[in-house]
Image (spheres, rainbow, N blue to C red):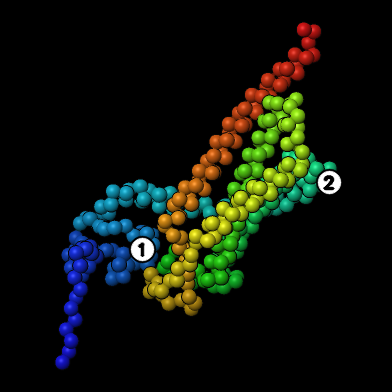
Amino acid sequence: MGTKKVKPTTSTINPFSDYYEDDPDYYNPCDDKYYDPYDEFCAIYRDNPLEYLAPDGDFLSSSSDWINTVYSLFRFFDKFKPIYEVACYIIFIINIFHLLILTRKELRSNLVYMIMIGVGISDLVQSLGTMAQHFMTLNIVYKIEDCGESGAYRYDHLIVNLVAKSAQVMSRRCSSFLALYIAVIRALAILFPMIQRVATIMKPAYGFLMMIIVLVSCTIWSVVFFVLTEFKKILTCGNLYRPSYVMYKFQVDEQFKYPFMFVDGCMALFVSFSYVILASVLVVAICKAEKRRRSLGSDE
């Protein structure tokens, strides 16, 4: 005697349940039953599904418009990714040339040039991170198979990407804060040229100490990104393809992802606005100093 299976009941309505599949006005066009692996919209939707569909097939979520706009912007700027990757190779070569000049004995004893060495090294790390990620996509280390999941790669591939991204988080902040420090000391030197304390912080020892502080702080910040990022195993491919190796993709805890991105963005904005303000103050100070210099040469 067979056992009758009882379908569990729930108070939550699933808009993609079997009840709605028979209704042509209510269906999920990106479900496995209807999914077209060449449909770019469904490729995005399956990675970032919204809550439900309207009878006419449009999303009812109030935030769907700006989400779709953000997706469109990401897809637009993604077209420039090859140009950015080529630029990183060029920047890497240029920075090596800069470091060969800045590390000469007569230059590295100067505070500004010492900080510029730190900026150059940070830019090298930034370029190396992009170059490493690009190299892994060239099918040299292994042949990448299409699983229908964006960002799904082999485990060692994701390890390289994670280390590269973490290093880039560190290098971007290091480069920006060190450049800001150069602007600060130049502004102080022009605004207060006769103050002994300003002359003291212009010594190379203080510059080296500041580089260590910035490096340690930015490294801790990048370690936070490294720890928050986890790997998610892809059990089924969206295009029903069975790869020859196990695939993984990045998965960041939503509770910490957006606060991290917000704080990181705030730091970038702070440095950018501070640099603009300091540059403006520096230009005004240079103009005033030039007027004082000219007045010293007059009879009055």
* 111 left or right, relative to 270: right
Return the residue at label 1.
Answer: 46
Most foreground residue, 211 or 66: 211
Residue 113 in percent (x, y) is at 75, 42
Name the residue located 19 percent from the left edge and 75 percent from the top edge.
7
The quarter of the picture where residue 37 lies is bottom left
Name the residue located 36 percent from the left edge and 50 percent from the top edge.
67
Q: Is residue 118 above or below residue 167?
A: above
- What kind of element bears circle 1? helix
Extreme-bottom residue of the structure: 1
Give the distance between the C-alpha atoms of the residues marked 2 and 1, in whole angstroms.
57 Å
- What kind of element bears circle 2? helix
Mark number displayed over residue 18: none
Extreme-top residue of the structure: 300
Q: Is residue 9 above or below residue 43?
A: below
Marked residue nearer the N-terminal end (2 or 1)? 1
Name the residue located 60 percent from the left edge and 36 percent from the top edge.
275
Asked whether the viewer can see residue 134, the reply is no
The quarter of the picture where residue 142 lies is bottom right
Between disc 2 and disc 1, the foreground one is 2
* 197 left or right, relative to 41: right
Residue 272 in percent (x, y) is at 56, 39
Residue 112 in percent (x, y) is at 73, 39
Q: In the image, what residue type sits under mark 2?
A: Lys
Residue 100 in percent (x, y) is at 78, 50
Q: In the image, what residue type sits under mark 1?
A: Arg
Return the residue at label 2.
Answer: 105
Q: Is residue 186 above or below residue 50?
A: above
- Assign the C terminus to one quadrant of the image: top right
Extreme-front residue of the structure: 197
